[in-house]
Every structure is written in C-alpha cells, then in structure tokens.
C-alpha cells in the first residue's frame, strides 16, 4: 500500500466498497436492487478515478501530506473488514445500512477528498464530483434507514 500512488489506492477502495454493496445485494435479496445500484455507482467512481489516472501520472496527481495515506488506509481497512464480516455472518438490511453510512460518512467526515490535495484541475473536479455523489449516497441510505422497522 505504501508504494502505490494514492489515486490508485482510492480506485481500489471504490472497488472494495462496490464489492461490499454487491455482497449485501446477494445476502439481502429483497433489497438487492437497492444495493446493486449503490454498487454500480461505486464502480463508476472507480472507473472515473482510473480514467483520471490514465490521463495523468497517478504518482503526481495528488500532493501527499502526513495524513493522506492514513485516511485512505483507515477507510480501506474498515471496508475490507466489513466484507469479511458480511461473508461469514448473516446481516440484516438495517445493519448493512449502518455500515454503508459509516463508510460513506467516513469519506466525508475524514475530509478524504478535501484533505487529498489534487495536483491538477482534472483530479480536483473529479474529487468534487465524487464528494457530491457521496453526499447523495448518504441521503439515499438515510432515507432507506427511515423506512426500516426496528
């Protein structure tokens, strides 16, 4: 992880989040369409990051600081742990929503897209778009959570 450019780590993390949501779709079939939609949007985020790294040298796309890799590692480790947990345990829709909200909020609350300083306008615009889409995911998840009977 320490030798990969952060832009590639972010792409990998989006794919991990997509895998988590796809796993939820399989384990919670009555809400499969909801989770697959979110999963597909995360694939779109990964694709956007991949396209951004194809346009420029990913190693020079983000100005790193002492926190950048730690933030990416924190989110990535959490997502991978939740994938392992969901693979082995039963999971309710409500639990999945809570986890997804934690993932999506961690990206915002940790200011991941604000703290990672893009080195050019293409990456800056991409981060702004992804931040807006993350906010939409939080809104979708919150509305879905309000529908749950707990």
Image (cartoon, helix red, strand yellow):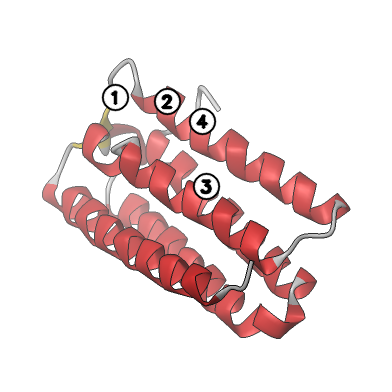
- The residue at the point 77 percent across, 46 percent down is 84
Q: Do tag 3 and tag 1 residues touch (Cβ < 8 Å)?
A: no
How far apart are labels 3 and 2 at the CA level?
Answer: 12 Å
Residue identifier under label 4: 74
Q: Do tag 2 and tag 1 residues touch (Cβ < 8 Å)?
A: yes
Assign a secondary structure to mark 3.
helix
Mark 3 or 2, nearer chain start: 3
Mark 4 or 2, nearer chain start: 2
Residue 13's tag is 3
Query: Picture coordinates of residue 15 (x, y %)?
Result: 56, 56
Q: Quarter-wise, where is residue 100 in the image?
A: bottom right
Mark 3 or 1, nearer chain start: 3
How far apart are labels 4 and 3 at the CA level?
Answer: 11 Å
How far apart are labels 4 and 2 at the CA level?
Answer: 8 Å
The label nearer to you, 4 versus 1, is: 4
Q: Quarter-wise, where is residue 35 in the image?
A: bottom right
Q: How many residues crowd mark 4 within 10 Å: few (<14), some (14–19), many (20+)? A: few
Q: Compared with residue 113, is residue 24 higher up or lower down, i.e. above or below?
A: below
Query: Picture coordinates of residue 110 (x, y %)?
Result: 34, 35
Q: Residue furthest left?
A: 121
Residue identifier under label 2: 69
Residue 71 appearing in the image: yes
The label nearer to you, 3 versus 1, is: 3
Residue identifier under label 1: 64
Q: Do tag 4 and tag 3 residues touch (Cβ < 8 Å)?
A: no
Q: Do tag 4 and tag 1 residues touch (Cβ < 8 Å)?
A: no
Return the residue nearer the eye: 42 or 58.
Answer: 42
């Amino acid at each position: 992880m320490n030798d990969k450019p952060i832009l590639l780590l972010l792409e990998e993390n989006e794919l991990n989040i997509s895998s988590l949501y796809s796993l939820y779709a399989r384990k919670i079939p009555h809400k499969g369409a909801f989770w697959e939609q979110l999963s597909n949007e995360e694939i779109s985020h990964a694709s956007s990051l991949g396209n951004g790294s194809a346009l420029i040298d990913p190693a020079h796309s983000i100005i790193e600081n002492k926190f950048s890799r730690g933030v990416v590692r924190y989110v990535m480790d959490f997502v991978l742990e939740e994938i392992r947990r969901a693979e082995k345990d039963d999971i309710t829709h409500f639990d999945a929503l809570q986890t997804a909200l934690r993932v999506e909020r961690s990206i915002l609350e940790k200011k991941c897209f604000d703290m990672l300083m893009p080195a050019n306008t293409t990456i800056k615009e991409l981060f702004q778009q992804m931040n807006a889409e993350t906010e939409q995911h939080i809104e979708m998840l919150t509305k879905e959570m309000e529908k749950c009977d707990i």
